[in-house]
Image: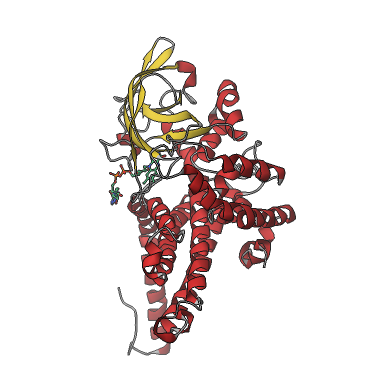
Amino acid sequence: MPASDKIPALVRDKVSDRARKVLDVVEKFVNEDCIPADPVYFAQLGQGSDRWIYPPIMEDLKTKAKSLGLWNMFLAKGHYKEGAGFTNLEYGLMCEQFGRSRVASEATNNSAPDTGNMEVLAKYGSEAQKKQWLTPLLNGEIRSCYVMTEPDVASSDATNVQLSIKRDGDSYILNGQKWWISGAGDPRCKLYVVLGKTDPNNPDKYKQQSIILVPANSPGITIKRMLSVYGYDDAPHGHAHLIFKDVRIPAANLVLGEGRGFEVMQGRMGPGRIHHAMRSIGAAEEALSWLLTRANAEHKKPFGKLLSKQGVILQWIAKSRIEIDAARLIVLNAAAAIDAANAKAALVEIAQAKILIPNMALTVIDRAVQIYGAQGVCQDTPLALMWAKVRTVRIADGPDEVHLEQLGRRENKKAAQARDLIQKQMDITDAMFRKYGTKEVGPCARL
Ligand SMILES: Cc1cc2nc3c(=O)[nH]c(=O)nc-3n(C[C@H](O)[C@H](O)[C@H](O)COP(=O)(O)OP(=O)(O)OC[C@H]3O[C@@H](n4cnc5c(N)ncnc54)[C@H](O)[C@@H]3O)c2cc1C
């Protein structure tokens, strides 16, 4: 059954005929080009210390993706003029397919952190900034990083960032350090989108920050070390610990103006969270395919039975299907809410998806790991790497607890309304008791 026939009934009428056709092309490209290319991509990177190269297969995949019209689908219709003209919901369905492969998002120029950075440039960049950075990013000629997190402060609260951005004539001078800067290992990475403080003493803590565009090869920037994720180096993308020492950047590289860093940062966040969530749904689907394959493998029958004949395994299969399908609806609902207005109006729906989906995907992937026994934790299936990647989504872009706290606070505001409704219903019950001349016997709610 093609992907377009599997669109959940609830959202089917929100997907255009054009998007359905493209979704099927995406699925075919992922199945027949990208997933088979994944091991070749890893092989081209090799095993040695010099894995910070550009695997040649990527350029071939990009050429094929462009020829199929699969390029820059993330820039949503109605919000950006530069994209391929799909809604967030339509792109979300495509993004699920990308999440099944290591190379698919990049091959179609839909990969983070470039997507968020292109959104920033398209939304807030000056014409000169767009010409210098947005055009080559849209063409897939260069890559970029988003540079916010710092080793010395709790960065889930971005008001804590310390990197100093000081005005000096026609320039700004940057000093500080950053870590977990994804993509800094890639030889094609030419742009750092950096959050720092231009006004650390401003009494409004949300006006202290600014965002500045920094050429990756600027004198004074050094890569102190590359960080691993559960032992994976994630080459050639990588996650860098960067030092900024008296880095001089033209003042014209500031985005939007001094003190507007938070505004820019928040404009960047919403749709990106939906993309990560839909990719995680794709990873969960892929894990379920691996689980089904092992459950029905004739050559591996512990205690003389196919694993799929064991009740517990059938339960894993059924639960995985239910959990993936339910989670998908949460993400698509968030995407539809962004389409109906914007990311700001869809804060609650986006947070729900950001929290729920990686946790669901980890559960499904873990079942798949378990069914493969020892093989599940080694390099012979994509599951171990998939688990490590999805696990980081619970931390990156804001840890679960931060989003849960915000959601919890919002929900808690409904307490008075909930209590008033319960009280009103009890008052009506009492009026009914009086009318019928009865007294409470058995269940009767009381506050
Ligand atoms: C693979 C990966 C890629 C990343 N890529 C990038 C990147 O490209 N650019 C970039 O700038 N950053 C990146 N990050 C960093 C990421 O955004 C931060 O790690 C994240 O924002 C959390 O900040 P922190 O690590 O400083 O944790 P801290 O802020 O120190 O928080 C630590 C823990 O405290 C708990 N906590 C925090 N707040 C609360 C609360 N309100 N209630 C209860 N508990 C709480 C949570 O459990 C949290 O995990 C990446 C991280 C990973 C793992």
169 up-or-down from 88: above or below: above
Q: Is residue 326 above or below residue 43?
A: below
**Quick check: can you spot residue 126?**
no
Q: Residue 248: percent from the left, percent from the top?
A: 39, 16
Would residue 221 be visible to someone looking at this image? yes
Q: x and y percent of residue 282 in the render?
A: 53, 58
Percent position of residue 430, x then y: 37, 80
- Residue at x 66% of width, y 36% of height: 81
Left or right of residue 114, residue 83 in this image: right
Looking at the rendered image, the quarter that the C terminus falls into is bottom left
The image shows residue 170 at horizontal and vertical percentages of: 44, 11
Quadrant assignment for ligand 1: top left
User: Residue most toward the left?
Assistant: 152
Left or right: 93 in relation to 270 = right
Q: Give whichever of 18, 304 is nearer the camera.
A: 304
The answer to whether 331 is drawn above or below residue 220 in the figure is below
